[in-house]
Amino acid sequence: MKEFYRRNLPHLQPIGGTFFITFRLKDSIPLAVLQQLRADFQAQKDAFLRNPTPENNSLFNQMRKRYFVLYDDELDRSAHGSCCLNGLEQAQLIMKELHRWDGDMYDLMAYCIMPNHVHLLIDTSFQLPDNLECFQLDSIDYVPLQNIMKRVKGASARYINKSLGRSGQLWQYESYDHLVRNDRELNNIVAYILNNPVKARLVKEYSLWPYTFCKWD
C-alpha cells in the first residue's frame, strides 16, 4: 500500500485498486519543458516533506493533481513529436489492446485516445475472487498494474510501429497512475477523460470524438 517511486513519478498501486492511467508517446513533450515541470514538482514536494503534517499531506495530494493538469495541458496544446495516434488505424490498434484484457485482468471503465497520449480508467478488483481474505493475497494469481501496462503498451507499440513502417521506442517508459479513492473522484475522472478532446479543442462535444469509450451511458 505504500507509495513508491519508479524512475520519476510516485505510484500507489494496492491490489485490486481502481486506477486512472495516462501514458504518452515518447516524443510528445519537449525535454526542456518536461525537465522544468519535474523540477517545479520536486521543489514543492521537498517543501511538503520538510513538514509532513496531515494537513500538508492533503495539500501535497492536491498539488500533485495540479501538476498532472499542467502536464496534460502541455500534451493537449503541444504539436511536438509525431502525434501518430491521430490516425484511425493506430487508434484502433490501441483500442483492440485495451479491450483484449477487459474481463480478464481488469474491468475496462473508460478511455480516450488523443493524438499523443491515452487516458485510461480500469478496475483491477475484477481479478480478485469473491470473499477474499487478507491471508489469501499471496496465493492468488494477480497481475499488478505495472505488468498490465507492460502488456498493453508493449503489444500496441509493436503493432503501431508495424503499421507506420518504423521501429524503436514508441511510448514513454513511465506512465502516470492515480489510485481512485471514492465514487465522487471516479465520476470526476470519467468526465475528465471523456471531455479531454473538448478541452483540447479537437471537437465541440465529447460524443463527436471517435476514440473514446465509457461502459456507462
Image (spheres, rainbow, N blue to C red):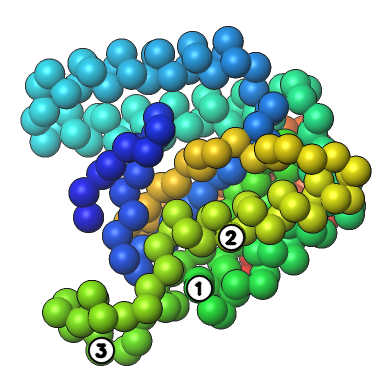
Label 3 Cα crowd, 10 Å radius (few <14 / some 14-19 / many 20+): few
Name the secondary structure under disc 1. Answer: loop
Residue at 37%, 20% (x, y): give it. 41
Tell which circle, 1 or 2, labels the residue nearer the N-terminal end. 1
Query: Which residue was labeled with disc 3?
Result: 131
Foreground residue, 103 or 67?
103
Label 2 Cα crowd, 10 Å radius (few <14 / some 14-19 / many 20+): some
Query: Which residue was labeled with disc 1?
Result: 105
- Can residue 201 be seen in the rendering of this structure? yes
Real-space Cα separation, disc 1 to disc 2, in angstroms: 11 Å
Instruction: Give the x, y percent position of residue 176.
Output: 48, 41
- Can residue 184 be seen in the rendering of this structure? no
Instruction: Give the x, y percent position of residue 80.
Output: 75, 21
Foreground residue, 168 or 93?
168
Tell which circle, 3 or 1, labels the residue nearer the N-terminal end. 1
Taking the image as shown, residue 41 lies to the left or right of residue 90, namely left
- Callout 1 touching callout 2 (CB < 8 Å): yes
Real-space Cα separation, disc 3 to disc 1, in angstroms: 18 Å
Q: Quadrant of the C terminus?
A: bottom right
Amino acid type, mark 2: Arg
Residue at 16%, 23% (x, y): give it. 49
Q: Which mark is residue 205?
A: none
| Mark in front: 1 vs 2 | 2
Q: Which mark is residue 151?
A: 2
